[in-house]
Amino acid sequence: MKINRFILILTCLLMGSVAFAQNTRVTGQVKDAKTGDPVSFVTVIQNGTGNAVSADADGRYAINVPANASLRFSSVGYDEVIVEVAGRSVVDVAMNSDNVLEEAVVSALGITRAAKSLTYAEQVVSSEEIAGNRAANMITSLAGKASGVTVTQSAAGMGGSAKISIRGFRSVNSGNEPLYIINGVPMSSSADVSGDTYGSSGMASFDNGDGIGNLNPDDIESITILKGASASALYGTQAANGVILITTKKGVAGQTRVTFNSTTNFENPVYRHELQNTYGHDASWKSWGSKVSNGVRAADNFFETAHTLTNSLSVQSGNDRNQTYLSYGNTTANSILGKNSKLSRHNITFRNTTKLAENLTLDASVQFIRQYTKNRPTTGGLYHNPVMSVYHFPADLNLNEYKEKFEVYDMDRNLMVQNWYKPLTANDDENPYWITNRIISEQWRDRAMGSLSLRWDITPKVYLQARASADYSARRESYKAYATTTPSVVLSENGQYITGKRTSMTAYADFLAGYKDNWGDFGFNATIGTSINYDESTNTTINSRYGGGELKLANIFTVNNMTVRGTDESWYRGELIGLFATATLSFRDWLFLDVTGRNDWSSTLAFSESFKTGFFYPSAGLSVLLNEALNMPSWVDLFKVRASYAVVGNDLPSRVTNPLGSVAYSGSVSSNTTAPFGTLKPELSASFETGFDLRLFNNRLSFDVEYYKTNTRNQLFSLNAPAGSGYSTYYVNSGNIQNQGIEATVGFVPVETRNFVWKSSINLGMNRNKVLALNDEIQTFVICDATNHGYALKLTEGGSYGDLYVRRFARDASGNLLLDDSGLPYKESGEFTYIGNTEPRLTAGWNNNFQIGGFNVNFLIDGRFGGVALDATQADLDGWGTSAYTAKCREQGYVEYEGHKFNDVNAFFSRVGGFEGINEFYVYDATNVRLREASIGYSLPKKILGNFCQDLSISLVGRNLLFFYKKIPYDPDSLLDTDGHFEGFSFYGMPTTRSLGFNIKVTF
Amino acid sequence: MKSIFKAIFVALAITFVFSSCAKWEDYNTNPFGVTDEMLAADYNNIGAYYPQIMQSVYYNYNNSNWEFQLVQNLTADLWAGYFSNVSAFLSNANTGNLFMVDGWVGFEWDVTYKRVMSPIFNSIKPLADNDQYRHFYAPALIMQVMAMSRLTDCYGPCIYSKYGQSATGGNFESMQDSYNAFFNDLDIAVGALENFINTTGSTTSNNFKRFDDWCNGDFAKWIRFANTLRLRLAMHIVKVDPAKAKSEAQKAIGNSYGFLSGKSDVVTMHAASWQHPLYTLSTAWNDCYMGAVIESFLTGYSDPREGKYFVETSNAAFKAAGRNFASIRMGNDAPGKGAEIPYSLLSTQKTDAAIIMVPAEAQFLLAEAALRGWVSGSAKTYYEAGVKESFNQYGVGGVDDYLASDAIPADYVNPVEPSWNIKAANFLSPKWDESASNEAKLERIIDQKYLAIYPDGYEAWTDLRRTGYPRQYPVIINASSDLKNDEIVRRCTYPQSAISSDPTGYQQALGFLGGPDKASTRLWWDVNKGNF
């Protein structure tokens, strides 16, 4: 059909160029062929020219064209229509809504394919769903919207990074983040996060955000998620964790559309731990003192309302041959820590699509991003964490006394020193206002992304395409902790200074050739190509604390003032060359066989045995459109069954094949103690998936169900070498981690009338992870060992990712608590023991959209069911006696647990609470169901707007509005880090916020 | 048409890949890494590894501090009674409470192999046969013997003689074999250094001196150090292999360079950027305070070294009880570090040099040798010379009065935690008693040696196991399953990482150990009988 259209266009062009005639005014109305309703804002183009207009909201248009012209009508969601004017002055047109069977989708490498031919599951999320109700990090708006995709984020909030996990955890060492592709080319999105229960090199745990969070959500047209290996197989070595394809907006032909979008959001930390205000402090500053009246919860007053203001202005313009999109976006935000904790970002985006010749298309885009952040909130941990300071603060003291006077003059040193009500020690808190005013961390990030794509349709059957892109970012950072910032953490009385610069660059080029043909009942569609990826990152960070150094002179923040000038220097470069081919063979348009193959050569394999051969990644899939193949009732719109198998890889770490010694901070040479790994192989994920896509009753009911099973082998383990081997560590490829699961999306349209439409969809995901094998030498692989704070995450053969180990109560053979002489329970002796798995058994989202006249109402409820989490925050608060729970127990005179009543509340929590207490008590079911998003929007009718603008809509939006169910004291969606080390663990992260905002969108 | 394209692409890709070979090897090589070729200038290819090794015996490589805490401070240093804490690590189920915390007791094993054995084997030893580098190897060998004797004395059988000969594991040997190899390696090292001095006529080498943070390039001092180390190791095995012990002791005594002697012969680790880890552990982290056993001696004897080692308490309750120094018993039931900790911190400063070996040790070893009749001269003379060496080292006076003192160790008194109070475990005074039994004489020698070699927790712990002195207090909370409150830790269990990485080797090790892999199992030289 497309070919026919192409020929038609070509014919028209030829005709147009030879014919010459007087222009006449043609008017008409465009209607939906089925419902008879007008179709708004249809683009009407005089075919083969740049002469174009846009129809109005009622579908009415007027255009001056020659009497022999042909008009092309196009609109999103409708099949294009071409009509000959043939001398008429009124041309009314009926357009058919997109036929599901002809729906085109973007697949791997940006290759557009017919949806029906896909042999695997992929899911598309539209711009409205992302930008309409925006989250702090754009990508976290995916939460609850795609089955099998788990979206969580760091507890930092403002500017923090997201953790996207598609179909479970599969790699022990090589990362589990999906590959991000923007307009067909890779984008770098690595996060810079360091989450730890203490902190990082004297600093608090930090989250400097990820690449994806820099984007302007208003620029996004759609996001396509390639979940399984079969969908992403063409990406070879990079495909194991799925791929997120982002398509940005383009210009539109035939009109100039200016859109102004402004969103203001307010966030309040309503989901924080419950604290008491009835008991004062004791001699050790814990809140086990006597009862007080008029006690104050410091946390009630400390946090401020965070706000985010995003404005963007975009221009879409163009004609038949050239379309341009230009936008400017601007974000300013404050976190709940107040005005000193802020972010500002500018985004400029330009995209241009040009037909250089009728069959030669050039698509070019450029983005510039500048982002400044100051004092990002910490993700948690002991060091410099205002949350801990505030939660520890006794009810009988007044935090306000330490707000203005966060520092006081010290005659001895002739400087302002931190003022706090207790001594500053490494394992305790410090003045939160000192943290926000005298520990100043700033970052400046500049990023430029550019891409070019040239496509030459040589004949209707053959095309060539070449693309090139680069994504470069540079980040400068500065960290200044003033003298008397807890000296035992900074390891200096004089403060701490860190300065650094990082750059990263991803460059990409590919070359594709496509061919398609039909031979009778058979169709053939193939693409072959080659690509090259180049990644580079550099880092130079100088930290006054490295190598045991410090600042010589207090509060002078320069490198020359450091005693050691310990520096981290790194420069990573990696290149990947792929050669790939994909072919689809179809029979009568209802049977599709899909095969792909890719061979990758990688610089990370240099010095290894596989350097020259590289690795080959195949996939094959089959889909059958049963509704076409068999005689089915007419109310079956589509019934497709599919199955596919693929083997893909996971990125290899560099330099494993060639470890070297290094020069340490002190200038001494640190010898290499890792054995070189000459037989390095990439991790291989073998994946099978099968499912069906069923759409009924004119798409009013649809089911998309998928079963998958992935086995990831060749896990890269760094093992302790036998002591006598001459090395202390060596690498092996081994293991087998299996994920299997079911994903289902059910869509239904319960009501569809002229003035009221209710669309609803439910998505479900269930993943089961199992470690089938690790390595002969290790029974247990420790993913995270924060035993000082009661938490360990370990993989064992037969276990699963997310197996949580904690300190448990001593019990007798039948599981009853054992009590000691003082009548208190005590901890089990020995190592930590398994208590449960942190991963959800089921994730679900229920999305609803109502169109009632000009009103548009949306709400999304999502939930995670099953899985446990350890709340070390609650444990510590109980140990400190500041939690509301301890007050309640003190009021009632006992703690009740497993049928026992313990009357000495203080003694009970001294033993059970705290980091090193009996954490079993603090392991909760992480199940929660929340109203994730809700919004109500209204588009002003054309009558009111008149000529002022084309469209004006306002909406009220909210996120995290309420929890329908949550028994755990914190929000399990917020993480101490986003790289998978801390799952199901809270340690004084920023409280989760409820966000409310409004959005105004005006289109001129 | 397709085949034409395919041919083009294959050709293109192959061109890419093969033209990329050298470039990709470049990409996959850390530009900030160093290779021996890059280091050749100034003998850095061999010498530059010395700072790492020298910072890894009394461990504080790269001033990491926390590693030192696990390598030594929360194990041997605690068990020797030098230090203690009220940090309530792991809710008082830690090494102080006689519990083998796997993540802790494995550090000595890991860092010694990683930071000492591996660079010597991979980077220094291969050059040793080359005349140009021969004199470099001898000091490395002496450090290797010191570090590895400490390791085997900590865990038991280890891999020494056949180190580096198998990538897949095994090659453990008996402690006797390791000790024989230690003595043999000391022979090689001393022989090489004597040869260097004899042939060059110089006791130093400028190209080596730059790297020597222990003995400042003085090869004669290295020989004296090796002799003292040989005497130390000989005395370790006196109960199990007296013949070998005697012959090695006499070899050390007979060497013309003698033993470490005089204040300038204190072997220390010192470098501009290097820090004493005890400073950070104590003053910065408040995890290391004066231990009850050493306080009993220093306070009871009014020992002038007390103020050199520790800081006076400012706590009023201790002052009122007549105590200027406040110590902590090991294995206590403290709930954790409170807001104010009344105990005596260490007087160690960040920039202090760290003691590797003191000359006084040689005198106390000779005193013990005299008791056994291996050396001429009286035990009393060597004993008093040892005390004098130590007083001289710390620049404190009154040694004659001290050696005449009848003072006895003080009881443990703690007005803040009165439940910890206990009678002194030790009872001998500094004054020599010639009429005493050899056993009592040895106890007096070891008591004073204990005070002189402070803060060498590893050697003090070895003396404790070997001789039973100085006597320790029982722990208050015992988290061990096999040691009683008043029993001492006799060895560290093998770290889990070593077991899992080398299961065959572990079975060999257990065979040589001759007992279960527990803290109560005695090592080869730790024979359960009297000292004489």
Image (cartoon, rainbow, N blue to C red):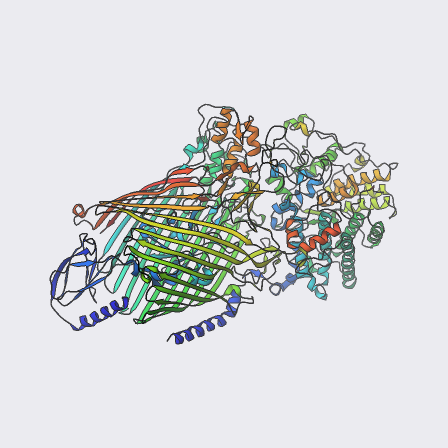
Asked whether A242 or A162 is in front, the reply is A242
Asked whether A71 or B456 is in front, the reply is A71
Instruction: Name the residue located 62 percent from the left edge and 55 percent from the top edge.
Output: A777
Tally of marks: 0
Asked whether A302 or A270 is in front, the reply is A270
Residue A715 figure quarter: bottom right
Which quadrant does the N terminus of chain A fall into?
A: bottom left
Across and down, in percent, residue B246 comes to: 85, 50
Q: Determine if residue A184 is in view.
A: no
Q: Give the left or right position of residue B216, taking residue A919 as reference.
A: right
Asked whether A668 or A588 is in front, the reply is A588
Across and down, in percent, residue B167 comes to: 66, 60
Residue A833 figure quarter: top right
Q: Looking at the image, is B196 positioned above or below residue B480?
A: below
Across and down, in percent, residue A69 comes to: 16, 67
Q: Looking at the image, is A5 positioned above or below residue A896?
A: below
Across and down, in percent, residue B355 comes to: 70, 46
